Image (spheres, helix red, strand yellow):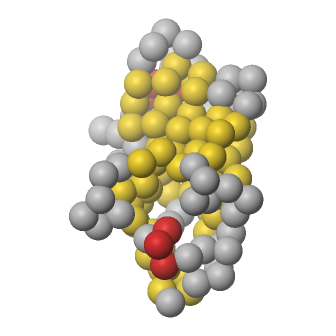
Amino acid sequence: QEHLVQSGGGLVEAGGSLTLSCKVSRMISSTFNPATISWYRQAPGKQREMVAQITSTRDTNYADSVKDRFTVSRDNARKIAYLQMNSLKPEDTGVYYCSIVDYGGLDYWGQGTQVTVSS
């Protein structure tokens, strides 16, 4: 069973938008309190890279390649994280993963979701 459940993703034309979400599963929700939330992507044949991060104080950090196009956010009450992706480019294609570290240091990953941007 997944500790983090991802949704969103899919196929979109260049210039389009997608929103990914990452929800803490009910199985661990009562004890897992997200601190730092990160989004990673892995393009075909490339290493996984971090694209966005939001801390417990809502400070954000973005990879240069997605700055001003992607927005990371969080809903602490519902324990959901979002990655809003605008002005998508073919080079944004890849499998996107969320990673959440809680205040106790536990680190869980989502199952990954495919994002494909056609030119």
Asked whether, in this view, residue 32 is left or right of residue 106, the answer is: right
In which image quadrant can residue 96 be found? bottom left
Of 38 and 51, nearer the camera is 51
Question: Residue extending furthest bottom?
Answer: 119
- Residue found at the far top of this picture: 104
Q: Image height check: is 2 above or below 86? A: above
Residue 107, horizontal then vertical, whole percent: 41, 24
Q: Is residue 69 visible?
A: yes
Number of numbered discs present? 0
Above or below 37: residue 31 = above
Residue that sits furthest to the left in the current view = 45
User: Whole-percent x and y of residue 82?
Assistant: 63, 49
Residue 44 location (% of width, % of height): 29, 67
* Vertical placement of residue 61 versus 21, above or below: above
Position of residue 53 measured from the top left corner of the image (x, y, whole percent)? 60, 38
* Picture quadrant of residue 110: top left
Question: Which residue is at the far front?
Answer: 64
The residue at 70%/44% (across/down) is 73
Q: Compared to 30, does 53 lie above or below? A: below
The answer to whether residue 26 shows anywhere in this view is: no
Name the one closer to the observer, 63 or 27: 63
Residue in the picture at 53% in, 63% down: 8
Q: Residue at x 49, y 9 (%)?
A: 104
Nearer to me, 114 or 91: 91
The quadrant of the picture occupied by the N terminus is: top left
Residue at 42%, 48% (x, y): give it: 49
Foreground of the two, 30 or 88: 88
